[in-house]
Image: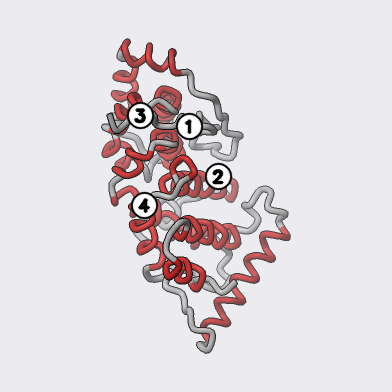
Amino acid sequence: DPWAGEPRAGELWAGGGGEDAPGAPQRDAPPDAPGQDLLRHLGAHEAAFGALRLPVRAGAGERGGLFEAAAVFLAAFCRGLPPNQRLVFGQLPLLLARLDAMPNSVMGLLLALFSANRPLCAAAPPRLFRALLAAHRAEAQLAPAHEVFTPPAGPATAASRGARVSPATAAATAALRLRLLLELLRPGGRPLRRSQRLVLPLLTAPPFALVTDPSDGEYERQRAAVVAAASAIEAASLGAGSEAPRGRWYVHTLELLAACADGQAAPLQATCRSLYPL
């Protein structure tokens, strides 16, 4: 059985403060295998799957709350237990369709679904990586307009369509997205090459294809942007993070590049290092 012996998840998302208050502390809880097994045998997950199918819009009242509650339940239902994770994995197309409207609820559930489960991470569809990286690209536009190097947004998201997004909301969503991408890249703390091969081209495609030749004048402009971003993050004390959105974006991008180079051959590591003049 290729699923046997999969490591249990450690710290996983188990709910937040709602889509309207994603900056609230998130609660991590250890798996409860006997209780999760019982819920599976009782078929409790089927009702939650039904709630996921309800049409929802960003900020939708009762339906949005019901969707969030179902996502929190299913995160607790599947966290760290491969049989339950496989059941929730079957709902992945539906979850991807709701990602734009309910990003924190969906990403929190996906984190519980994929955490420490290498077979499922290896089966994650390219569409998921494209959606997460498109949102990462769009997040760069939330930074103040006067900062250097503003990559254009990808496909329309709540941020790129001009929806009102508070700094705290943007910071919490970005942190959850990074956590999910890093889990897909390094499930259980070990690099997964398939995920690395999917993420790196998306991360380095235009407008991420930065100049790597130090003799190019553009190289120095980009270097100045990275230094300014690092200074902004230091000034914000790395605490809330929302005070330095551009700095946060750079740091998250660097973390993703590092995860893509983890365990890879020296040429790829050199390529990743050259993408940012640090």
Query: Which residue sits at x=28%, y=47%?
Result: 125
State the residue in front, 42 or 189: 189
Disc 2 or 4, which lies upstream in sequence? 2
State the residue in front, 157 or 131: 131
Q: Amino acid at mark 1?
A: Ala
Q: Which mark is residue 85?
A: 3
Circle 1 sits on which residue? 9
Inter-mark Cα distance, 2 to 4: 23 Å
Circle 2 sits on which residue? 172
- Name the element at disc 4: helix
What is the tally of numbered marks visible in this picture? 4
Is 183 above or below relative to 54?
below
Q: Quadrant of the C terminus?
A: bottom right
Query: Which residue sits at x=35%, y=64%?
Result: 201
Inter-mark Cα distance, 3 to 2: 24 Å
Disc 4 or 3, which lies upstream in sequence? 3
Badge 4: residue crowd in 10 Å (few <14, some 14–19, many ≥20) = many
Which mark is in front, 1 or 3? Answer: 1
Disc 3 or 2, which lies upstream in sequence? 3
